[in-house]
Image: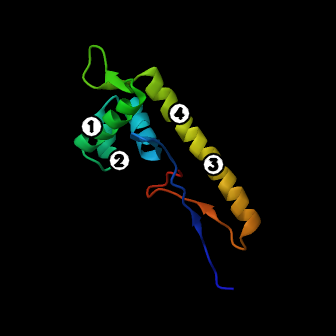
């Protein structure tokens, strides 16, 4: 059998009839806004434009009917609303749970070691 080195890739998201509610990219965007206080910095760190990031946030807010970010008081920039923070953290935890389960099952079913996906730069998703 040839030497095979597979990597697990999982694309999970939550959607409604109105469109995508939340995926790993949107959760990551929210968490980067939380860390930096800046939508612009968060978007740049993810390699997207401010306009694209803003559009994704607004689309998710339209589905939830509630804001996920708000202007920070007395400063330029943004903070997450309690809903935005809880959704981002819950999604990341859920994604990690699903990935852990999938890696465990892959180890049981395939003859090769399956490794988790690692972002360029060393971030394991």
Quadrant of residue 5 within the rendered picture: bottom right
Disc 1 to disc 3, C-alpha distance: 30 Å
Which quarter of the image is occupied by the N terminus? bottom right
Percent of width and height locating residue 46: 35, 47
Mark 3 or 2, nearer chain start: 2
Mark toward the viewer: 1 or 3:
3
Location of mark 2 (residue):
46
Is disc 1 surrounded by few (<14), some (14 to 19) or many (20+) residues within 10 Å? some
Percent of width and height locating residue 18: 39, 39
Percent of width and height locating residue 107: 73, 63
Location of mark 4 (residue):
89
User: Which residue shows up at 44% across the image and 58% down it?
Assistant: 120
Disc 3 to disc 4, C-alpha distance: 14 Å
Quadrant of residue 32 within the rendered picture: top left
Disc 4 to disc 2, C-alpha distance: 18 Å
Disc 3 to disc 2, C-alpha distance: 23 Å
């Amino acid at each position: 059998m040839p030497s095979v080195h597979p990597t697990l890739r999982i694309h999970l998201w939550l959607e409604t009839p109105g469109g995508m509610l939340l995926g790993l990219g949107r959760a990551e965007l929210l968490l980067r806004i939380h860390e930096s206080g800046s939508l612009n910095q968060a978007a740049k760190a993810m390699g997207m434009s401010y306009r694209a990031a803003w559009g994704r946030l607004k689309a998710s807010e339209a589905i939830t009917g509630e804001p996920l970010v708000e202007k920070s008081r007395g400063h330029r920039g943004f903070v997450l609303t309690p809903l935005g923070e809880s959704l981002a953290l819950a999604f990341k935890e859920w994604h990690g749970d699903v990935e852990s389960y999938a890696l465990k099952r892959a180890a049981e079913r395939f003859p090769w070691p399956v490794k988790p996906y690692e972002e360029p730069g060393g971030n394991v998703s």
